[in-house]
Amino acid sequence: MGIYPKYQKSNYTCKKCNWTGKGAAAIMGEEVGHSGFDLVCPGCSDDSLDFIEFPLLTDLARSGNKKERMQAQRELAEMAAREALELRHAAQLPDITARHLTFVLRETRLNDILFIVLYEAGVEIWREQGYYEYYWRYLEIGEILVAKYGNRIMDFVVDASSVYLAGDCGFAYSKVYQFRIKLRKNFVLYDPIKN
């Protein structure tokens, strides 16, 4: 597995057509899962020369060129600031006495910044900055809701106008659906009668 941009100076030989050359002469193929791309042979278009992994921001902040280091450091600082304001613990959520709870997650924009907002019975209970393809964040928030409110949760709905949740991820809504099914299986409609 090659690392970007070091692959450009590495030598490659195609097993299919015997082309030999530097990675810089090869073709950058399709991106795979936001983690890298296939390196394609310029001689026969075979995509098995190598898989080139994208660098992590921390790698660029440490060993990129001056421009890459500055950009990566800025992005890391923005990520840290955003993560500091994210829901992390059940204690951050308000106490709600209702016996049956349905939460709704909506996207909204304020000064062109995307936020995901959590509602229960039409009342906003949490807000944090959102971003493209945040389905995994939905799942994290869902687990925190379960930790706080337990089996009183009937559902955790994603508002129909929420367009950034799935992003380019084909299985995102399947994950959301599976989580919602799990909530429904654990939901208790009535409290047991106590004698």
Image (cartoon, rainbow, N blue to C red):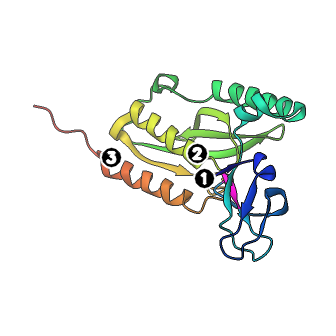
- Residue bearing the label numbered 3: 187
Where is residue 139 shown, x and y percent of the image? 50, 44
Where is residue 108 shown, x and y percent of the image? 72, 44
Q: Label for residue 159?
A: 1
Where is residue 152 shown, x and y percent of the image? 36, 40
Q: Secondary structure at mark 3?
A: loop
Mark 3: amino acid: Phe
Q: From the viewer's side, name the closer residue of 47 and 182.
A: 47
Q: Residue at x 32, y 46 (%)?
A: 187
Whether 177 is drawn above or below 47: the answer is above
Q: Residue at x 75, y 74 (%)?
A: 45
Q: Earlier in the sequence, mark 2 or mark 1?
A: 2
CA gap between label 2 and label 1 equals: 6 Å
Q: Secondary structure at mark 1?
A: loop
Q: From the viewer's side, name the closer residue of 7 and 148.
A: 7
Q: Residue 37 in magenta? A: yes
Q: Residue at x 16, y 37 (%)?
A: 193
CA gap between label 3 and label 1 equals: 21 Å
> Mark 2 touching mark 1, by CB under 8 A?
yes
Q: Label for residue 105?
A: 2
Q: Residue 93 in magenta? A: no
Q: Is residue 46 visible?
A: yes
Mark 1: amino acid: Asp
Q: Left or right: where does residue 77 sit relative to residue 86? A: right
Q: Earlier in the sequence, mark 3 or mark 1?
A: 1
Q: Label for residue 138?
A: none
Q: Which residue of the protein is positioned furthest toward the left in this rendering?
A: 195
Q: Which residues are magenta?
A: 34-38
